[in-house]
Amino acid sequence: MNPYSAYQQQGYSTWLRIDMLLALYDGAIEKLEAACAALRKRDTAAAKPLVDRARLILAGMISAVDAGQGEMGLQFLRLYEFVNHSLAQGRLKDVDGALKVLKTLREGLQAIRPQAVEMERSGQIPPADALTKVEMTM
C-alpha cells in the first residue's frame, strides 16, 4: 500500500481532541511569532499574510466552541473575540497581545491534557471522529 493511501485510511481519527486543539494553537502561535518578528523589522508586507493565516486558524477554533455548553465556552469566545480584534488592528502591540493570550490559553490546555485524554479514552467525551455534522447558525 502506498503511503498516501495509508494516510487516507488513518485520517484524523487517531488524533485525540485535545491534541488537535493544541496543534491549532501551535499553528496560530507560530504564525504570530513570525508576524511579530516581521513587525519589529517594520515589514508589514511580510507580517500581513502571517496574521491572516493565524486569523484563519482562530476562525476554526471559534467554530468549534459550543457556547450552549456553559460559561467556559462563552469565556473562550470572548477571549477569541479579543484576539481576533487585536489581530485586525495589525500593530505590533496588538499582535503581541493576541499572541500572549493564545500562549496562556495553550499552557492551560496543555496542563489539562492528561485529564482530557483520560476522559476521551473512557468515553466521557466522544472521540473526534464521532463528530459527523457541522451546524451553522445565523
Image (cartoon, rainbow, N blue to C red):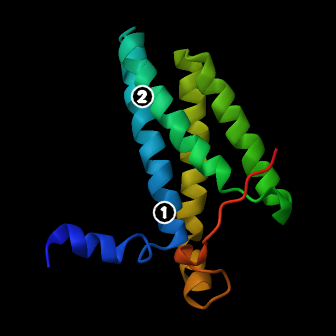
> Where does residue 65 sit, x and y in percent of width and height?
70, 56
> Where does residue 107 sit, x and y in percent of width and height?
55, 55
* Residue at mark 2 to residue at mark 1: CA–CA distance: 20 Å
Residue topped by disc 1: 20
Query: Could you tell whether 33 is left or right of 115 in the image?
Result: left
> Where does residue 100 sit, x and y in percent of width and height?
57, 37
Q: Quadrant of the N terminus?
A: bottom left
* 12 is higher (above) or lower (below) than 26: below
Residue topped by disc 2: 50
- Residue at x 85%, y 61% (from the top left corner): 68
Q: Residue furthest left?
A: 2
**Would you call the spot at circle 2 few (<14 residues within 10 Å), some (14-19), or many (20 or more)?**
many
- Residue at x 53%, y 59% (from the top left corner): 21
Q: Mark 1 and mark 2 in contact (Cβ < 8 Å)?
A: no
Q: Disc 1 marks which amino acid?
A: Met
Which type of secondary structure does the marked residue at label 2 adopt? Answer: helix
